[in-house]
């Protein structure tokens, strides 16, 4: 099929350059400077675009146990936090015990709070990484790790922020055997979408643990130690404990 460009299909992409200029006319030079800061980075070149920011949760407690931070002037507390780190963190909130939970933007900001020993004009403090909020868990499926120990797996994946590994087992003929499913713990803010195991790339799914069930009342969400029910329940019918032979569910 004949076109208005004389068969030159590339001319259709930029009519201003091809249809209205003579073949001998020089094209206008591009305004883009390939040596400017806006150009693409060279292969292997590291730029801030490739830097992974890893937020961290930091707890800040008053060194005076009988007087938590929420008992002090909140305006003075805010100014003292600004003295520690001029750039505001992502979030600051009070905990149940009246102290602070800080979500920092990255490791650098977290270290500033961890090194602080005082809130100026307020009180001495103790700063620590939160024991559980800085760990995420994911599940991977790969037969390649079945024969390796959890310690060897962690060592091989340490450069990808993996801190712990737990194999999911199943019962076969009365014995526990390893499966190809592994629970990986990471000290990152979010679980990665995939992880590299040698030359393999494995998808990472979120780990959803089984719900907690009380062994006293058999309700979900708490353990027997924290159960508020004074009367033990039957694990079959959930009524008050009774003779198993009298259970309605049998």
Image (cartoon, rainbow, N blue to C red):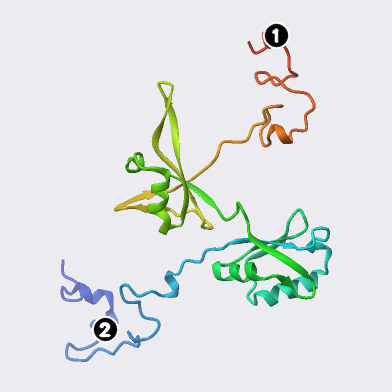
Mark 2 vs mark 1, CA separation in Å: 92 Å
The residue furthest top is 245
Which of the image's four quarters has the N terminus? bottom left
Q: Identify the residue at horizontal 60%, vertical 67% (top origin).
A: 110
Looking at the picture, how far across and down is residue 25, in whole percent?
A: 21, 91
Q: Is residue 32 above or below residue 58?
A: below
Query: For numbered disc 1, what is the local secondary structure?
Result: helix
Looking at the picture, how far across and down is residue 129, in whole percent?
A: 62, 59
Looking at the picture, how far across and down is residue 21, in whole percent?
A: 23, 88
The residue furthest bottom is 25
Which of the image's four quarters has the C terminus? top right
Could you say which quadrant of the image residue 6 lies in?
A: bottom left
- Residue picked out by circle 2: 17
Q: Is residue 158 visible?
A: yes
- Residue picked out by circle 1: 246
Looking at the picture, how far across and down is residue 120, in whole percent?
A: 75, 75
Sequence-wise first label, 2 or 1: 2
Q: Is residue 114 above or below residue 31?
A: above
In the drawing, does residue 135 fall left or right of residue 230?
Answer: left
């Amino acid at each position: 099929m004949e076109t208005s460009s004389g068969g030159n299909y590339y001319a259709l992409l930029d009519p201003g350059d091809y249809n209205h200029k003579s073949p001998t006319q020089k094209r206008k030079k591009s305004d883009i400077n390939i040596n400017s800061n806006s150009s693409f980075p060279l292969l292997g070149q590291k730029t801030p675009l490739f830097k992974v920011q890893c937020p961290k949760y930091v707890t800040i407690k008053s060194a005076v146990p009988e007087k938590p931070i929420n008992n002090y002037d909140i305006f003075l507390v805010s100014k003292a936090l600004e003295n520690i780190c001029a750039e505001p963190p992502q979030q600051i909130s009070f905990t149940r015990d009246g102290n602070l939970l800080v979500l920092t933007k990255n490791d650098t900001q977290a270290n500033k709070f961890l090194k602080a020993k005082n809130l100026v004009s307020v009180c001495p403090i103790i700063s620590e990484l939160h024991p559980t909020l800085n760990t995420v868990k994911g599940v991977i499926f790969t037969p390649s790790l079945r024969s390796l120990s959890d310690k060897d797996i962690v060592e091989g994946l340490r450069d990808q922020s993996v801190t712990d590994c737990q194999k999911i087992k199943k019962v076969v003929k009365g014995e526990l055997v390893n499966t190809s499913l592994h629970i990986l713990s990471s000290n990152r803010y979010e679980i990665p979408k995939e992880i590299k195991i040698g030359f393999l790339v494995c998808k990472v799914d979120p780990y959803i643990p089984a719900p907690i069930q009380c062994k006293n009342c058999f309700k979900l969400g708490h353990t027997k130690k924290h159960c508020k029910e004074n009367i033990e329940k039957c694990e079959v019918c959930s009524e008050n404990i009774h003779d198993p032979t009298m259970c309605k569910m049998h």
